[in-house]
Amino acid sequence: MAIFLTADSKVIVQGMTGSEGMKHTQRMLRSGTAIVGGVNPRKAGTDVEFEGGVTVPVFGTVAEAMAATGADVSVVFVPAAFTKAAAVEAIDAGIPLLVVITEGVAVKDTAEFYSYAAARGTTRIVGPNCPGLISPGASNAGIIPADISGGGRIGLVSKSGTLTYQMMYELRDFGFSSAVGIGGDPVIGTTHIDCLEAFQNDPETDAIVMIGEIGGDAEERAAAYIQEHVTKPVVGYVAGFTAPEGKTMGHAGAIVSGSSGTAQAKKEALEAAGVKVGKTPSETAQLMREIMQALSA
């Protein structure tokens, strides 16, 4: 099983005909994702040929693509200035899952389209500024390399794209039910807690890796949720122990202000909730390896 994305998911790509859209649509197709359409109003009615003899039709709107194909997932590869409009269009069409890969989206824009989606209650947003999500062997919506890990029984939720990839590679001998890169912007759609809840309820996920970073209080809130609601083993990693105060580090949301948002505070909150926290990604992977070995003993 998997969370949010399954072998039955039908995916469209907003911005498929752009350079990034084309490149990553090809990668998603290669990994077995059912890409059923692209969206570009200027190229509506055309088809795009991909390697392997795959032909993908282009539609003028998300609503048209959904009506014609039954799509239930859209992946957004459009420039930051147009991301809000693309997201609102998908939300208006009622797409169940919207994966926003684009980085550099204005926080105001994200807050507005997230609030719009929350008010309508029909669309889950992953991102923006994220690598997307993958259920290995079933479907891949975004830019996560599909060949770094196979299917298994570990769930992964991460703010960082590169740490998502590293953790999947380091635990490739066990594999993953799903891996979700939620993004590191100050405002995002799907949160650590959303994924923790889904993994807790997934009968085919045995343990969870949670990767956070400095800035905000998402990890502290996740720790409180774990303490109250999660019975499966959780290991964690928090990036940014050496980050200087007041300097944004990589992600727009990764900034320490005074005593707020530090890696140490997040680590302590997670450990107080019973989460084993590694000092490095590799140590975190080893902690999970030990848990999985114990579970299979």
Image: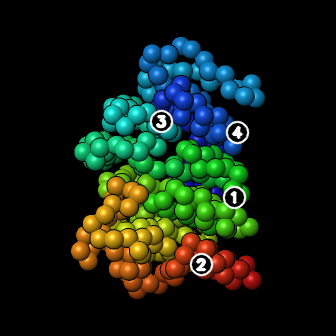
Foreground of the two, 37 or 187: 187
Q: Give the alpha-carbon distance from disc 2 to disc 3, as whole Å.
A: 34 Å
The spot of residue 35 in percent (x, y) is 61, 33
| Other-residue count near label 3 (Cα within 10 Å), few / some / many at <14 / 14–19 / ≥20 | many
Compared with 18, 193 (above or below) is below
Q: Which mark is residue 30?
A: 4
Label 2 belongs to which residue? 283
Residue 57 versus residue 152 in the image, above or below: above
Q: Nearer the viewer, mark 2 or mark 1?
A: 2
Of tags 2 and 4, which is closer to the observer? 2
Q: Residue 211: in sight, yes or no?
A: yes
The answer to whether any part of residue 220 appears in the image is no
Q: Residues within 10 Å of mark 2 (few under 14, many from 20)?
A: some
Report, in whole angstroms, how far the alpha carbon at label 1 lies from the one at label 4.
15 Å
Ranked by sequence position, the earlier of labels 1 and 3 is: 3
Q: Residues within 10 Å of mark 1 (few under 14, many from 20)?
A: many
The structure residue drawn at horizontal position 66% and vertical position 67%, both measured from the top left corner, is 170
Q: Amino acid at mark 2?
A: Glu
In the visual, does 157 lie left or right of 177? left
Residue ID for mark 3: 77
Element assignment for label 3: loop
Label 1's element?
Answer: loop
Q: Position of residue 69 (x, y in %)?
A: 56, 27
Looking at numbered disc 1 in the image, what kind of residue is underneath it?
Ser
Q: Which amino acid type corresponds to the residue marked 3 in the rendered image?
A: Phe
Q: Secondary structure at mark 4?
A: helix
* Residue drawn at x 28%, y 47% as measured from the top left: 107
**In percent of the image, x 29 and y 71: which residue is there?**
245
User: Can you give x and y, in whole percent of width and height, for residue 41 in the image?
Assistant: 44, 18
Cα distance between the residues tagged 3 and 4 = 18 Å
Q: Please, what is the three-letter code of the amino acid marked with disc 4?
A: Arg
